[in-house]
Image (tube, grey):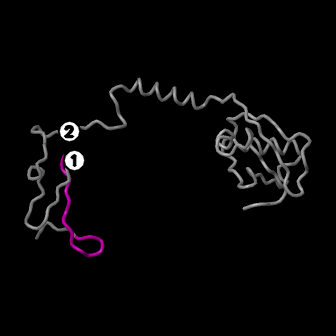
Amino acid sequence: MSDGLGEGGDGRRRPRCSRSSGVAVLSGPGKRASPKAAGANTPHDGQARVLPSAWTSLDTAGSMQEAQDALETYRKKDPNKVVVRFKAVGNAPIMKQNFYKITASNRFQAVIQFLRKELGWKAGDPLFTYINLAFSPAPDDTVTNLFKSFATDGHLIVNYSTTAAWG
């Protein structure tokens, strides 16, 4: 006996939902699930309609070229330089030269490696870096994003320490 109701996982009875030609039609007790009843347009020859997708396009060659151009633009290195000022915190050694120009497209990891090289520290030696004495940036942040957001007097201030100073 079919009353047009289905049983859910929790034991309650719910109206059945059938799909035909991409149109969801709800059927309740005593009602038939029919796309015609819902006013759906179905082809007379029995073939399903194919609607264009947002992912497909008639001009695939042009959109692929546009995507390739955007990717190449993203891959290009930014030749601009950012002035980075290093300041020691706590018992960290003070550098003789504090100002350096670093390529803006570099990740902050490159700044950390550069600082290690300048201080003569090995990869295992503890080094904690902070921006403006406030937070420790992620190594995958770009120098240009940090500079745009946290620059002070035209340069990015990077504080460094041998022990965790904040946060």
- State left or right for residue 120 relative to residue 22: right
Element type at mark 1: loop
The percent position of residue 40, horizontal first and vertical second, equals: 13, 47
Q: Residue at x 87, y 42 (%)?
A: 118
The percent position of residue 62, horizontal first and vertical second, equals: 41, 23
Element type at mark 2: loop
Q: Residue at x 46, y 24 (%)?
A: 65
The percent position of residue 68, horizontal first and vertical second, equals: 50, 27
Depth check, front residue: 23 or 150: 150
Look at the picture and state if 132 lies above or below 2. Answer: above
Q: Residue at x 8, y 53 (%)?
A: 37
Depth check, front residue: 158 or 58: 158
Q: Residue at x 86, y 48 (%)?
A: 122
Please tell me how crowded label 1 is: few (under 14), some (14-19), or many (20+) other residues with Cα within 10 Å: some
- State left or right for residue 149 relative to residue 100: left
Q: Residue furthest bottom?
A: 11
Residue 163 lies in the magenta stretch: no
- State left or right for residue 115 relative to residue 62: right
The residue that label 1 is drawn on is 22
Residue type indicated by callout 2? Arg
Looking at the rendering, the stretch of residues picked out in magenta corresponds to: 7-21
Considering only order in the chain, which callout, 2 or 1, is on the residue closer to the N terminus? 1
Depth check, front residue: 70 or 79: 79
The residue that label 2 is drawn on is 49
Residue type indicated by callout 1? Gly
- On the rendered image, what quadrant is the C terminus found in? bottom right
Residue contact at pointers 1 and 2, CB within 8 angstroms: yes
The percent position of residue 49, horizontal first and vertical second, equals: 20, 39
